[in-house]
């Protein structure tokens, strides 16, 4: 059920849809120029994506918000963090703490609860989950110099993917290149930023090979925030036949990141860029070594090529050190697989596409805890736990034409079973297990007003189990002797959305000859929302009773004139707790009950506005120049469930330039820019529900970057 005030949102959306339909009605009078001498319209929304429906579909045919970015969309940008390349996506809010490796990714509020890593949004690399079986994700292996495209699905995707109530982001390596090449990339900037590497590829009619190595080093804009990374990605692409493809996918990552910690309000006002002394004393850091090897086999078969089969097995290793109050060492070994089968065959005269698939992911290994002596591992083993997490899930989907190639119905449903099994190897008596399972259906309609304009709506359920670290037990739970929190339940929600999307292209028109737009209204009712809180600086999790989220996402882009492009997005978020009686644990371990009903959810801005203007100009066929300016406005955010304080609103202005030079087979790409031009001091990350008031982490101050890429193509 909607809250009464969402009626006003529906009115706003109604007018937006009416305006879109008016635009459609005006454009339908345009006819072929050979007949009347006026401009013609052409359909341009022909991007095919797989992530949204787990079958190949054009974006205009998918009944929910989907965005596909190519690496050419950000080729002049800085490529350090995920917010460097996804900054203009409406509905997506990114809070980067220390670069790319501890970024909060939030879609419609899902993911905002995580004070470390990514939750509520499924992250894939070439279709293989970077997310662990419990949904927790860190993205060290994502190298934007290696990525060729990004597919992003906004909103409830639980009917197709595990623990994906907020959506899915699939990073796809750049294997689809036409000719062999070699590329050296170099980037440097403020605060000791250096990024260097090599990218190469070779291809013939039977196989292709992509390899990328990157070295990243950064001193950071706060003390005790340096990091370094070695990242290697590779894809072997084999084409044994016209309808069959086999890929070998691998990566290896080795790096370290030091954490400066969060500040109190008084510390932030005194010096927003100082480090938390406790984290300095602990030498709080993360050391990561991780690798993955996977195979992706897909084939189309049958007399009429109606059958598609894909099998995707993979293995993972992770070796992870984390220092905080203690010194923990994680050894994790995983194996998993995904499969999908698609059958395309009309029912009568109506198009129909049925698919079935599943995922299994098993991960196990010991977690050893030692005393943390100034960031060094002590000799005394204080805990040893074998942690096993597994997930098994199956889905079915049917995409059916209802009327005249215009109205389509998409039905999807998924069953997931997530299991946790922790065994205490020191005491034994604390061993226990937790299981979470649910069936999450979804129904969606897509009505194509024309081949370039569509209305869509959907309703479905979502399911999000706690992550392994979220199940850490706390001193005053109902059973403090067991390892896994017995009181924490899975988060479930009911999700509704309605929207309009389109892409209108008129190449003969001088102004606004390419317009892309999408507007979505959503309402989400959440039960048992998982919320972080702290005891003695350690983070634990609890359930809020009921949360209501309503919002509007608006995104648009257009070529004002040839070479001049405008991009804009706006997200309005109204997220509040309908019912929430919280048990608060004070630093002295005394407890109290607080009623947070009616409060606004923390770490989500009510208004998030982005605007950019970019100009490309070809001086000669071999020389192209680029200049871009952008601005983002973010309204203030509450720092805790009690709404005890709110951060200030902020505006960030960035600018960048570039030059693309082509000399025969040689290519030189030069880029640079200045971020946060006005040197705005702002809270870039909110550490939610800190028991000692350490909510605040400063965003990046004014900084510059520059880069030069040297490439050669063998053709």
Image (cartoon, rainbow, N blue to C red):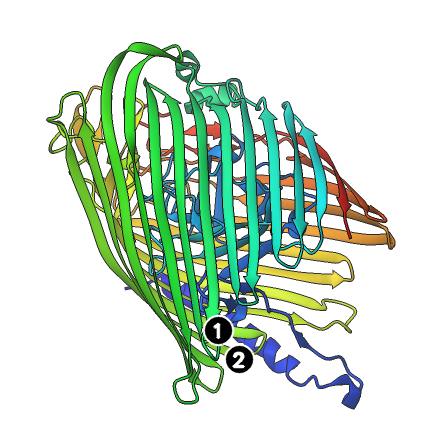
Q: Where is residue 188 in the image (x, y as percent from the top left)?
A: 68, 29
Q: Is mark 1 on a helix, strand or loop?
A: strand
* Residue depicted at 49% across the width and 25% down the height: 257
Q: Nearer the viewer, residue 351 or 647?
A: 351
Residue at 64% in and 81% down: 26
Picture quadrant of residue 582:
top left
The residue depicted at 42 percent of the width and 67 percent of the height is: 10
Query: Residue 449 got which mark?
Result: 2
* In the image, residue 392 above or below residue 274: below
Query: Mark 1–mark 2 contact, CB under 8 Å?
Result: yes
Judge the density around disc 2: few (<14), some (14-19), many (≥20) Cα neighbours within 10 Å.
some
- Residue 638 in sight in this render: no
Q: Is residue 190 left or right of residue 357?
A: right
Residue 22: x %, y % from top left: 58, 78
User: Can residue 368 be seen by looking at this rendering?
Assistant: yes
Res 455 label: 1
The span from disc 1 to disc 2 (Cα, nearest Å) is 7 Å
Q: Return the mark for residue 345.
A: none
Q: On the rendered image, what quadrant is the N terminus found in?
A: bottom left
- Measured as percent of width and height from the top left, residue 420 is found at 22, 40
The reply, left or right, for residue 689 in relation to residue 192 is: left
657 or 168, which lies in front? 168
Q: Position of residue 88 (x, y in %)?
A: 58, 51
Q: In this view, does 300 lie above or below 375?
A: below
Badge 1, how many Cα within 10 Å: few under 14, some, many 20+?
many
């Amino acid at each position: 059920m909607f809250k009464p005030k969402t009626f006003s949102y529906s009115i706003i959306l109604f007018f937006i849809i009416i305006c879109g339909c008016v635009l459609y009605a005006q454009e339908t009078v345009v006819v072929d120029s050979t007949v009347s001498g006026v401009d013609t319209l052409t359909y341009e929304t022909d991007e095919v994506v797989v992530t949204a429906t787990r079958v190949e579909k054009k974006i205009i045919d998918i009944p929910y918000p989907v965005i596909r970015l190519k690496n050419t969309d950000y080729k002049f940008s800085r490529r350090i963090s995920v917010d460097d390349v996804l900054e203009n996506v409406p509905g997506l809010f990114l809070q980067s703490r220390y670069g790319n490796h501890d970024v909060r990714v939030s879609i419609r509020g899902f993911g905002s609860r995580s004070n470390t890593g990514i939750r509520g949004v499924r992250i894939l690399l070439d279709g293989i989950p970077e997310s662990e079986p419990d949904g927790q994700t860190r993205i060290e292996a994502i190298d934007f110099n290696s990525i060729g495209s990004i597919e992003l699905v906004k909103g409830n995707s639980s009917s197709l993917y595990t623990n994906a109530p907020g959506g899915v982001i699939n990073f796809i390596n750049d294997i689809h290149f036409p000719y062999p090449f070699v590329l050296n990339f170099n980037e440097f900037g403020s605060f000791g930023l250096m990024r260097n590497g090599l990218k190469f590829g070779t291809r013939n009619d039977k196989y292709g090979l992509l390899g990328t190595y990157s070295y990243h080093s950064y001193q950071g804009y706060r003390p005790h925030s340096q990091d370094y990374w070695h990242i290697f990605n590779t894809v072997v692409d084999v084409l044994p036949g016209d309808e069959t493809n086999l890929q070998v996918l691998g990566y290896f990552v080795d790096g370290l990141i030091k954490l400066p910690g969060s500040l109190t309000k008084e510390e932030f006002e005194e010096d927003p860029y100082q480090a938390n002394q406790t984290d300095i004393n602990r030498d709080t850091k993360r050391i990561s070594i991780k690798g993955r090897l996977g195979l992706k086999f897909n084939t189309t078969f049958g007399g009429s090529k109606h059958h598609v089969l894909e099998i995707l097995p993979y293995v993972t290793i992770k070796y992870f050190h984390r220092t905080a109050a203690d010194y923990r060492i994680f050894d994790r070994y995983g194996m998993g697989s995904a499969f999908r089968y698609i059958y395309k065959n009309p029912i009568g005269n109506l198009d129909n596409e049925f698919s079935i698939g599943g995922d299994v992911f098993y991960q196990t290994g010991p977690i050893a805890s030692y005393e943390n002596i100034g960031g060094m591992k002590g000799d005394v083993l204080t805990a040893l736990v074998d942690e096993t997490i597994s997930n098994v899930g199956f889905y079915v989907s049917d995409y059916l034409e209802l009327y005249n190639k215009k109205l389509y119905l998409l039905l999807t449903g998924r069953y997931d079973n997530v299991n946790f099994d922790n065994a205490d190897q020191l005491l034994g008596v604390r061993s226990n297990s937790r299981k979470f399972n649910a069936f999450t259906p979804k129904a969606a309609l897509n009505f194509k007003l024309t081949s370039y304009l569509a209305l869509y709506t959907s309703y479905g359920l979502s399911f999000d189990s706690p992550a392994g670290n979220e199940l850490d037990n706390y001193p005053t739970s109902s059973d403090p002797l067991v390892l896994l929190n017995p009181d924490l339940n899975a988060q479930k929600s009911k999700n509704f959305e309605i929207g309009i999307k389109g892409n209108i292209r008129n190449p003969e028109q001088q102004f606004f000859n390419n317009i892309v737009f999408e507007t979505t209204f959503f309402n989400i009712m959440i039960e048992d929302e998982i919320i972080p809180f702290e005891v003695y600086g350690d983070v634990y999790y609890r359930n809020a009773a009921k949360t209501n989220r309503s919002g509007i996402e608006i995104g648009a882009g257009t070529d004002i004139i040839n070479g001049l492009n405008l991009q804009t997005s706006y997200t309005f978020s109204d997220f509040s707790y309908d019912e929430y009686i919280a048990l608060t644990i004070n630093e002295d371990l005394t407890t109290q009950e607080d009623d947070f009903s009616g409060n606004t959810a923390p770490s989500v801005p009510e208004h998030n506005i982005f605007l950019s203007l970019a100009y490309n100009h070809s001086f000669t066929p071999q020389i192209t120049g680029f200049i871009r300016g952008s601005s983002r406005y973010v309204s203030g955010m509450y720092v805790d469930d009690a709404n005890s304080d709110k951060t200030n609103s902020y505006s960030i202005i960035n600018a960048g330039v570039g030059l693309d030079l082509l000399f025969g087979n040689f290519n030189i790409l030069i880029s640079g820019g200045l971020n946060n031009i006005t040197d705005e001091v702002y809270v870039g990350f909110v550490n939610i529900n800190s028991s000692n008031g350490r909510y605040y982490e400063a965003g990046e101050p004014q900084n510059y970057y520059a880069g030069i890429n040297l490439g050669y193509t063998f053709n």
